[in-house]
Image: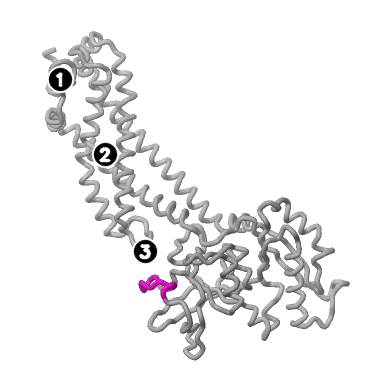
Amino acid sequence: MNDLHDSQRTSLPPHGGGAGWGCGLLFTQIRNEWRANLWLALELLIVSVVLWYILDLLYSRVVTYLEPRGFDIEHCYLVQMGCLTDKSPDYLADYSGERQRDDIYELCERLRWRPEVEAVSLSHNSYPYNGSNSGFTLAYDTLYSNGIFRHVTPDFVRVFRYTGVNGETPERLAELLRQNDFLGSENLFRHQGVSLASILGDGFYLNGDTVNSYNVGASLNPVRYSDFQEARWSRTLLVNIESTARSNPGYINPDMELCVRVRADQDRDFIHRLKADSESQFRVGNIFIADVRSFADIRRSYEQAWINQLNYYVVGMGFLLLNIFLGLLGTFWFRTQQRRGEIALHKVHGATNRNVFARLLSEGMGLLLLVTPLAIVVEYFLTRLELNAWHAATYLEPARMVFCIVASFLLCALMIAVGIWYPASRAMKVQPAEALHDE
């Protein structure tokens, strides 16, 4: 035993196998082996910061994705209209704007008659996941906002099930639109610290017009632009287009968005059944049904680029985490293998396998605890330098910071535990006499 290293002598458990091994002796050994532990501590510091950065990015993406959308596209379909040309034998000449408008209204009415259809709407640049926008500027007293202008028929809010912040149902919101009230999202003036629900009523001025004021009848729960964009940036204003269509018939045309909600218990092969009946039941004048798409497909197509990017992030981060784990596993494996003699001495003095594992694990956790405060300082300065993910209009969210720090610490602790457990379990299977003989 005279050939044993000083570190092994230092780490011998007192009196019967490690039951009385204390924090003071543990940190004494860590200090005595400072040269080897310095590099391990540096590795743990880098790993902690990298894990925090990964978790911070994932946190911001996941929390954004899980935000309430403010609409519901389940059982919803987009019906694309077409108009016959003069090359068709069924083409009607002298097709006025009023006739076209009335035929489109008739087509919508026939869709409403179908027993499986719950609601039908027309709109311009308004349905979810379309990528086309109509902008607006809105003023109220000294407040100012801009966002997306949605020109819709009243049943649009029933199709996509918009709701109000004061509990207004889609049906109630549709009634307000029929009264020619505007509907705005609650976050219209959020950047100025004002809730729209607190200033509902008349006195809103649109697009720089300071003569004609408008009434906002309800405040909507924020309507998101997509699943990967925060609700706080999606400011929405809805207006009924029917009054405009009365004075300007050409406003209602085949390029409009015809959206349909189907009853949940009858949404089976709806596209196939509607297309089968389209020629016989839904040809009105020169207007016909050209195509039908589900909003599930529209959403998938619109967000494919974001989904691909997220997949790249997940694969890259998974690969990075695997490398971090293998690096820690290799480090602790090497350290444990070097201590086969020390483990044998523990067992000779009566230590159980559990005592030995707890001893080795406490050393790794002790190093992690020592570097964690320094890692937190580094992470805080990275946040102040705005090198992490942007979310909720800031780089520094206390809740996100705490969550990511705790999660990165737990991941490091888990990888340390696994990295120590497997090689230690193998080393503890060696007979003490054999290990001491090798030493």
**Is residue 180 rendered to the left or right of residue 419?**
right
Residues packed near mark 1 inside 10 Å, few (<14), some (14 to 19) or many (20 plus):
some
Residue 143 in which image quadrant: bottom left
Q: Which residues are magenta?
A: 190-198
> Image point 23% across, 40% down: which residue?
42
Q: Label 1 vs label 2: CA separation?
A: 26 Å
At numbered mark 2, what does the secondary structure look like: helix, strand or loop?
Answer: helix
Residue 236 at x, y = what percent?
50, 71
Question: Which of the labelled discs sits on residue 393, or is there none?
Answer: 3
Kindly identify which residue carries mark 2: 43
The residue that appears at 59% across and 69% down in the rendered structure is 126
On screen, residue 25 above or below 194: above
Distance of label 3 from label 1 (alpha carbons) = 54 Å
For discs 2 and 3, the disc positioned in front in the rendered view? 3
Q: What is the crowding at mark 3: few (fewer than 14 residues within 10 Å), some, or many (at least 20)?
A: few
Q: Position of residue 177 (x, y in %)?
A: 58, 75
| Marks 3 and 1, the one that precedes in the sequence | 1
Classify the position of the C terminus by image quarter: top left
Left or right: 357 with respect to 123? left
